[in-house]
Amino acid sequence: MDSPARLLTSARLSAKLSIRALAARAGVAHSTVTRIESGRMDPTIGMLERLLLSAGCELQLTGRSLRSPQLGDLTQAWATDPSGQDRPEWTHIRGFLDYLTLNPDAVAPSTAQMPKPSGSDFIDNLLAGIAEKACDDAGIARPSWTRHVPPLTHRWASPGTPRMRQRAMELTPPQLASRGITMTTDSLWRNLHPLDV
C-alpha cells in the first residue's frame, strides 16, 4: 500500500492542483497538506479521505488476514467434563471448517503442519481426520503427519439413542470412521456458500 504522502501527492498532481489550491478545496491549512506530503504528518483516515476527495479521488481501504487459521490452533479447543469425557469446543471447530469451506485455497496451508499433541487421543484423531477429509474434499494430497496419529483403540461416538448411533455410523465420513470416531458429516461440516456470509 502506498503511504499517505505518496497517495496525496499523486492525487494532487493528477488533479493539477497546487498545495494551496488543494488545501483551499479541502478547507485545511496549506501547511497541513505540506506536512502530509513530506511525510512529517500521518493524517487520520478521515483527513486523508477529505483531501483525496478534494482532488477528485476516492480512498479505498481493504484488510486481509496475514495468516490463515491453522488446524493446530484447535489443539486447545476442548475441555474435560466432570465424568472425565473429552468435550471439544464444537463452535471453534465448525468456525475453522467454515473458513476452509469458503476459502478452499487455504486447505493446504491450514492443515500442513502437525498440531502439537493435545493431551487427548480423541482430539488428536479428530484433528487428523478433519485434515484428511478437508484435503480429500479439496482434491489435494493429505498431509503426511496424519499417518503418525494412531487411531483410537476405543470407538468414540456422539451421544444419542442406539438408533441415532447406528444412523451416525452410516453417515460418518470414512476419514473419521477409520480413526474410531462416529460422527455424521453434517455434525461438523455445514453446506456453506459465499453468499451465506
Image: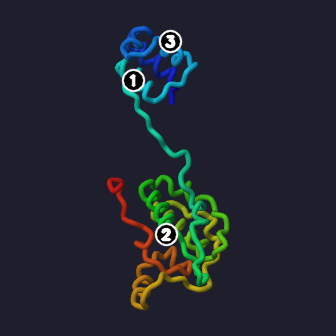
Residue at mark 3 to residue at mark 1: CA–CA distance: 15 Å
Residue type at mark 3? Ser
Secondary structure category for the residue under label 2? helix
Give the side of residue 56 with respect to residue 75, left or right. left
Question: Mark 2: few, some, or many residues within 10 Å (few <14, many ≥20)?
Answer: few
Question: Mark 3: few, some, or many residues within 10 Å (few <14, many ≥20)?
Answer: few
Q: Earlier in the sequence, mark 3 or mark 2?
A: 3
Question: Mark 1: few, some, or many residues within 10 Å (few <14, many ≥20)?
Answer: some
Give above or below for 56 relative to 145.
above
**Residue at the spot x=51%, y=79% of the render?**
177
Which mark, by number, is residue 31? Answer: 3
Q: Earlier in the sequence, mark 2 or mark 1?
A: 1
Give above or below for 79 relative to 141.
below
Residue furthest toward the bottom? Answer: 162
| Residue at numbered disc 2 | 90
Q: Earlier in the sequence, mark 3 or mark 1?
A: 3
Q: Nearer the viewer, mark 3 or mark 2?
A: 3
Which mark, by number, is residue 120? Answer: none
Q: Residue 195 in the image: state x and y as whole percent.
A: 32, 53
**Residue at the spot x=65%, y=69% of the render?**
118
Quadrant location of the C terminus in the rendered image = bottom left
Give the side of residue 30 with respect to residue 154, left or right. left
Q: Say if residue 37 shows up in the picture.
A: yes
Q: Residue 128 in the image: state x and y as whole percent.
A: 57, 69
Q: Say if residue 139 shows up in the picture.
A: no
Which mark, by number, is residue 50? Answer: 1
Q: Residue 149 in the image: state x and y as whole percent.
A: 64, 72
Secondary structure category for the residue under label 3? helix
Residue type at mark 1? Arg
